[in-house]
Structures are given as C-alpha cells and as structure tokens.
Image (cartoon, helix red, strand yellow):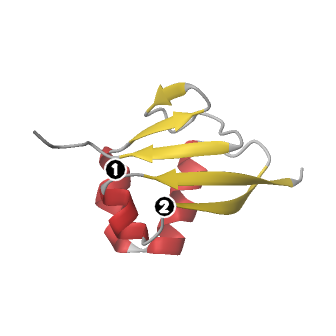
Amino acid sequence: MGETQVEVRYFAAAVDASHCESEYVTVPVGATLADLRELILSRHGAPMEPILRVSAYLVGEDLTRDLDRVIGGRVDVLPPFAGG
C-alpha cells in the first residue's frame, strides 16, 4: 500500500497545543482526516483533543469537517478564530 508525507500546518490555538506551526508526518497512502487526527493526538497528546474536535480542515482547496475525507499532501488545522 505504501506511505506518504503530509505537511500539517497549525493555526491559532492549534499552534499553542502542538508547540509548532507545521510539521511533516508519514501516513499510509489513502489516509483520511480521521487517521490524521489520531496521529496528531498520539504526537501532541490531550491538549490537542478539544481543538481537533472543533476544528475545520483545509485539504487542498476544500474546507471540510468530513473525517472520511482522504487527505493529500497538505492539511491545515483551523480551530475557530476569535477576535474583534
């Protein structure tokens, strides 16, 4: 089946919880957002769980919350933004 590298970029609270703005992770070819979320949780622990639960994800040019969505070469983790 094989593996591939995915760039994961974090924004807002996800940066605080992961302690990085981006990283490359190795996933199986055909991995979904659900697979990626599990990998992120295993790397960054409990502080990421509530953030990932409410985040949207930019996969390519598609904004989604569909955890069955197959991922590509880059995924942006977009928690809700607040400001004013």
Considering depth in this image, is 81 or 35 the residue closer to the camera? 81
Q: Residue at x 32, y 53 (%)?
A: 12
Q: Would you call the spot at circle 1 few (<14 residues within 10 Å), some (14-19), or many (20 or more)?
A: few
Q: Residue at x 32, y 46 (%)?
A: 79
Q: Residue furthest right?
A: 1
Using the image, determine if residue 53 lies above or below residue 39: above
Q: Residue furthest left?
A: 84
Q: Quadrant of the C terminus?
A: top left
Q: Residue at x 53, y 73 (%)?
A: 43
Relative placement, left or right, of 78 versus 69 is left
| Viewer-side label of 2, 1 | 2
- For disc 2, the marked residue is 21
Q: Earlier in the sequence, mark 2 or mark 1?
A: 2
Q: Residue at x 39, y 62 (%)?
A: 15
Residue 30 position within the rendered picture, expressed as x and y whole percent measured from the top left? 75, 42
Secondary structure of the residue carrying tag 1 is helix
Considering depth in this image, is 84 or 81 the residue closer to the camera? 84
Q: Would you call the spot at circle 2 few (<14 residues within 10 Å), some (14-19), or many (20 or more)?
A: few
Residue 14 position within the rendered picture, expressed as x and y whole percent measured from the top left? 37, 58
Residue 67 position within the rendered picture, expressed as x and y whole percent measured from the top left? 51, 39
Q: Quadrant of residue 48?
A: bottom left
Q: The residue under label 2 is which amino acid type?
A: Glu
Secondary structure of the residue carrying tag 2 is loop
Residue 3 position within the rendered picture, expressed as x and y whole percent measured from the top left? 83, 55
Using the image, determine if residue 30 lies above or below residue 38: above
Numbered tag placed on residue 37 in the rendering:
none
- For disc 1, the marked residue is 53
